[in-house]
Image: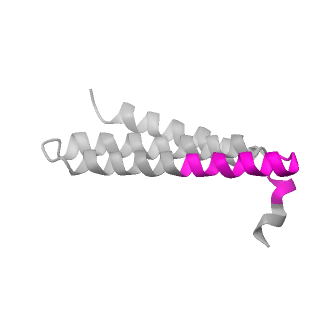
Amino acid sequence: MSLEPYLLLAAALLAVGLYGALSQQSVVMLMMGLELMLNGVIVATGAFWFYVSADRPDGQVLVLVVVTAMAVEMAVGFAVTTAIFRSRDVDMVDSATDLKD
C-alpha cells in the first residue's frame, strides 16, 4: 500500500477536526475537533515514519509521546469543562469568556 491513502486519511481527519473546532460553540465539541486534528497529525506522522525509516524506533516513540500528551490534554480539558458545567451550568464557549480575566 502506498503513502497516499494514509495522507488522504490524515488530511480528512484534519479537515473534519478543523471544521468542528471552528464551527461548534460547545466546549466538548470543540475539544473533539481538536482531538480529530491531532489524530490526523498522528496518522501522517506514523505513515511518514513507516515509509521513511521503518527500521528505526524513533517514529514509534514520537507517536507514543503525542498520543500520551493528547490523552493528558483531553483529561485536563474534560475536567475543566466538568468543573465549569457544575459551577455555572454552562457548556458553551461564549458563556465562559470571563475565565481569561
User: Does the magenta-highlighted stretch encompass residue 70?
Assistant: no
Q: Which residues are magenta?
A: 73-96
Most frequent secondary structure within the magenta stretch: helix
Give 50 or 82, whichever is nearer the viewer: 82
User: Does the magenta-highlighted stretch encompass residue 90?
Assistant: yes
- Residue drawn at x 18%, y 47% as measured from the top left: 57
Query: For residue 9, what is the image quadrant?
Result: top left
- Residue drawn at x 34%, y 45% as measured from the top left: 64
The quadrant of the rendering that contains the N terminus is top left
The quadrant of the rendering that contains the C terminus is bottom right
- Residue drawn at x 75%, y 45% as measured from the top left: 23
Relative vertical location of residue 44 with respect to residue 73 in this rendering, above or below: above
Give 76 or 15, whichever is nearer the viewer: 76
Residue 73 placement (x, y as % from top left): 54, 52
Give 5 or 87, whichever is nearer the viewer: 87
Relative vertical location of residue 97 with respect to residue 90 in this rendering, above or below: below
Residue 78 placement (x, y as % from top left): 65, 45
Looking at the picture, the colour scheme in use is one colour
- Residue drawn at x 45%, y 52% as measured from the top left: 69
Residue 61 placement (x, y as % from top left): 27, 49
